[in-house]
Each structure stands twice: as structure tokens, then as C-alpha cells.
Image (tube, grey):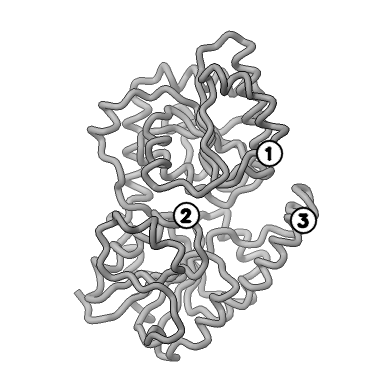
Amino acid sequence: MENKKVAVVSLKFSPGHISHLIAFYKLFFSLYSEVFLLLDEKYKKYLKDENIENIIYYSTDKDIYNYDIYLFQNPSILNHKFANKINKNSYIIYNFHEPWDGIKKYLKESFKNSLKMYGAHYYNKKMLKASNKILVPSQYALKMYKKYDFKYNNNVSFFPLIFDDECGINKIKNTKKEYFSFIGTATKNRNISKFIDFCTYANKKNSNLKFLIYSRRKVDDYNINKIQNLINKGIVKVKHGKPLTNEEINEGYLKSYAVWNNYSRSTQSGVLAKAMMFGTASLASNIGSFKEFINNNYNGFVLERGTNEEILKKIDLIIEDNNIKTNCRNYFMDNFYYKNQINLMKGLISKNA
């Protein structure tokens, strides 16, 4: 174990990144002698049950600028300001989860969202320039990065979204999987309205399907009203409008046989990877990086058209497949479990850091 001091950094609270932060913390602890999580204080109550000793909550009064290696996990308007204060001999890695995809795609969602994404990219460019190494989570993301952002930092490599194992195969075997679920933020680009339309479609077809919706963002009243009768009957269960704990989210994955990845835009999906951790298949749109990680009839399906009829047929295949839980779990362990990516990280930074 090398005598180096490492900080895994998230200066903006984002509960969806907690699992990644813990995984990177453990990965670096396998390589170096001192590793710390350096976080926004809002993470505090979500990490109180995690067995992590070295957590520092961000304060400019502390000596936090002289570590050997920094890995920044998610976007923040503070990232580049913090990076510019770091000792020049330190090595800065930016895990760039969602590279810029061109303004036209964001305008299709909404003008408001396009402004938000344009602003995020403005600050991301500053962080790219301030970093020594950029990581992107898929080959599709790498292609986009080279198209739009390569000029800001050309030291870029693929590195998958990583997780610790929060489940275990025995737990999967002993839990009844009974839901097709939407887990994640209920946004237009994740097609929450299409998922809700499918719930009503499946119910009209007299199927016995049940559904979960877990979202930090509140599902709008229009969509909730469309399924209120299904909620009242217990066919659809909804938790939304506030950050969910990791335990709540994990329960949703564990009880689901499939999750919704029928998005209109994605460079990689933490939902996809974490679902596989729990032996849960993905139904994904034929865009972005999904074809890199989903093998049809093995760990889910890439939809050809994404129609309700096609989705219902694929769900039937998943429910009938006795091997798919094991297939998903095996794929997660090979590709997204942090212990199997330690050597990749070591190779990416050993020549420079």
C-alpha cells in the first residue's frame, strides 16, 4: 500500500452519487494509506450508518488542499474554484459522468432544461481545464467527449461506474421479485410519462403486473392523476418528492425483476448498473451507451421501438427466465464491482500521480 493521501470529493449534495463515493473510497483504500471522503454537509445524515471513519465535511478553514490525489465525483459550481486552490503537485481526477451532448438534444426536452445544462457545461469546462485526468463512464461518453470537450483536456479514459456490493446473491435468491420499477429522478428525458402510460396500458390488458416509482423529484400532478386509481388499488406504489435513503432505494431494486431505462438521453446509467447488483434486469431504449452494457436475453433488453406492446412482451420473457437474476448479478460483479476495477484505476494513474 503506497503512502499517499487521497480525497474523494463531492461538493454538491446528490444522493444518487452516494454509492459511487463509497465505492471510490474503498477502491483507493486498496491502493493508498490514507483516504478521505470530502463532502457537502448535506450528506451527513445519509452516511451515518456507513462504516466509514474518514469523512470531512467541506470547510475552507481546514487543511484540505494538500492531498496527493483528488477524485471529484459530480458537477458543482465549486469544483473548479476548489481545484484551483489545490497544491500544484497534487493529481486531480474528474469523474465526468455526463459529457456534453450538444444543445439540440437538450432543447428537445425543454428550454429551461437546456439553460440548466448549458450552465452546467460552462462550469464543467472550467473543471476539465483544472484537472489532470478525466474519466468517462462509457465508450459512447468517450465519443461525445472527443467531439465536444477534447480541446479542454485530452487526457481522458473510460472508467465504468463503480459500486460496492450492497446486496449479496443469497439475499437475491431469498427475496420475491414482483415489480417493474421506475427508480431515479422523474424527468422528461427519463420518460416518466411513458412509464406511467405503460402502467395504465398493462392494467387495461388485464395483466397482473405491479409497479414501483421511486423518485427524489415529485412526479407532476398530471401524471400522478393518471394512475391514482392504480395507486389506490396497490397496483402502483409511489415514493417521491424527497431524497430517499440508500436502504429505501436498495429495497426497490431488490424487489424488482426489471427497471425502466427507456430514456431519451443517456451516456450511462447508474440505475442500470445498480439494478444488476440486485439481480434486476433493465429495459432500455436503443440509444447512447445501453447497447454496451445490455445483452438481449441475458441481462435485459434493448428495445427496438419502445412501444407498450414490445415492453409487455419483454417483461413476460424476463419473468419467465429463471437465469436472468444470476446473469445480471454476474455482469455486475465483472463490470461494476469496484474490486474488479482496482487494477484499471492503478494503471490509469500510476504513470502520473
Quadrant in which the C terminus appears: bottom left
Residue drawn at (53%, 55%) of the image: 139
Q: Relative to the observer, which residue lies in front, 37 or 108?
A: 37
Q: Relative to the observer, which residue lies in front, 261 or 297?
A: 261
- Give me the C-alpha separation between circle 2 and circle 1: 21 Å
Q: Residue furthest top?
A: 206
Q: Which amino acid type corresponds to the residue marked 2 in the rendered image?
A: Pro
The residue labelled by disc 3 is 112
The numbered dot on residue 28 is: none
Q: Position of residue 193 (x, y in %)?
A: 68, 33
Q: Earlier in the sequence, mark 3 or mark 2?
A: 2
SS class of the residue under badge 3?
Answer: helix
Q: Nearer the viewer, mark 2 or mark 1?
A: 1
Q: Would you say 102 lies left or right of 347 here? A: right
The numbered dot on residue 220 is: 1
Q: Which amino acid type corresponds to the residue marked 1 in the rendered image?
A: Asp
The residue labelled by disc 2 is 15
Q: Earlier in the sequence, mark 3 or mark 1?
A: 3
Q: Which amino acid type corresponds to the residue marked 3 in the rendered image?
A: Lys
Q: Position of residue 169 (x, y in %)?
A: 25, 35
- Dot 2 crowding, Cα within 10 Å, few <14, some 14–19, many 20+: some
Q: Residue furthest left?
A: 1
- Give me the C-alpha separation between circle 3 and circle 1: 16 Å
Q: Position of residue 97 (x, y in %)?
A: 53, 59
In the rendered image, the vertical position of residue 350 relative to residue 344, given as above or below: below
Residue drawn at (45%, 22%) of the image: 318
